[in-house]
Amino acid sequence: MNEIEQLKQRIGVLENFIADFVYSDRYISQKHFQFLDGKNIQFAKGTGTKIGTESTQKIGFLGATPIVQQAVISAPTAPSSVYSQAEATSTVTAVNLIIAVLKNFGLTS
């Protein structure tokens, strides 16, 4: 095989690689992505975008250890005309659970 044929073959391989990359519906990477200062990620305004498509996929923010979706937090008891100890405890419990979830994901310290 002469040099021209080798170059044509290499160009063909590169063309196939580029076509697979450009026309794929997803990209799989085994490397980290790093964005320089001032660079943003933009999303379309139509259907929307999900980060994590299943509740068992782990996500962490700002250096926090990635975790799965947290359990539901029950709504506090609606207060009556006289705010009882049980209602106060229910509200405090719900707020504490919300704070814990925010901390677990790394959204607050």
Image (cartoon, helix red, strand yellow):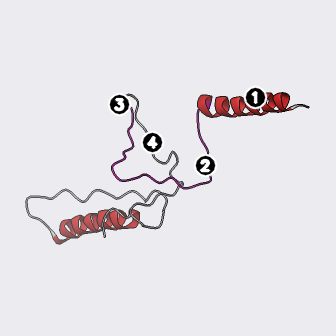
Q: Nearer the viewer, mark 3 or mark 2?
A: 2
- Camera-side residue of 11 and 68: 11
Distance from the alpha carbon under mark 1 to that under mark 2: 23 Å
Q: Amino acid at mark 3?
A: Lys
Rendered view: 3 above or below 68: above
Q: Residue at x 28, y 63 (%)?
A: 94
**Quarter occupied by the N terminus:** top right
Q: Could you say where residue 3 lies in the image, as x and y percent from the top left?
A: 84, 32
Q: Residue furthest right?
A: 1
Q: Amino acid at mark 2?
A: Ser
Distance from the alpha carbon under mark 2 to that under mark 4: 18 Å
Q: Residue at x 23, y 59 (%)?
A: 77
Q: Could you say where residue 73 lies in the image, as x and y percent from the top left?
A: 35, 59
Q: Which residue is mark 3?
A: 45
Q: Amino acid at mark 4?
A: Lys
Q: How many numbered circles are shown?
A: 4
Q: Which residue is mark 4?
A: 50
Q: Amino acid at mark 1?
A: Gly
Tell me if label 1 and label 4 are in contact, CB under 8 Å: no
In magenta, the rendered stretch is: 24-44
Distance from the alpha carbon under mark 1 to that under mark 3: 37 Å
Q: Residue furthest front?
A: 3
Determine the secondary structure under disc 1.
helix
Q: Nearer the viewer, mark 3 or mark 4?
A: 3
Q: Residue at x 40, y 60 (%)?
A: 61
Helix, strand or loop for the magenta stretch, by majority: loop
Q: Residue furthest left?
A: 81
Q: Say few, some or many: other residues with alpha carbon within 10 Å of mark 4 (under 14 / 14 to 19 / 20 or more).
A: few
Quadrant position of residue 87: bottom left
Q: Which residue is mark 1?
A: 12
Q: Residue at x 25, y 64 (%)?
A: 95
Q: Which residue is mark 2?
A: 29
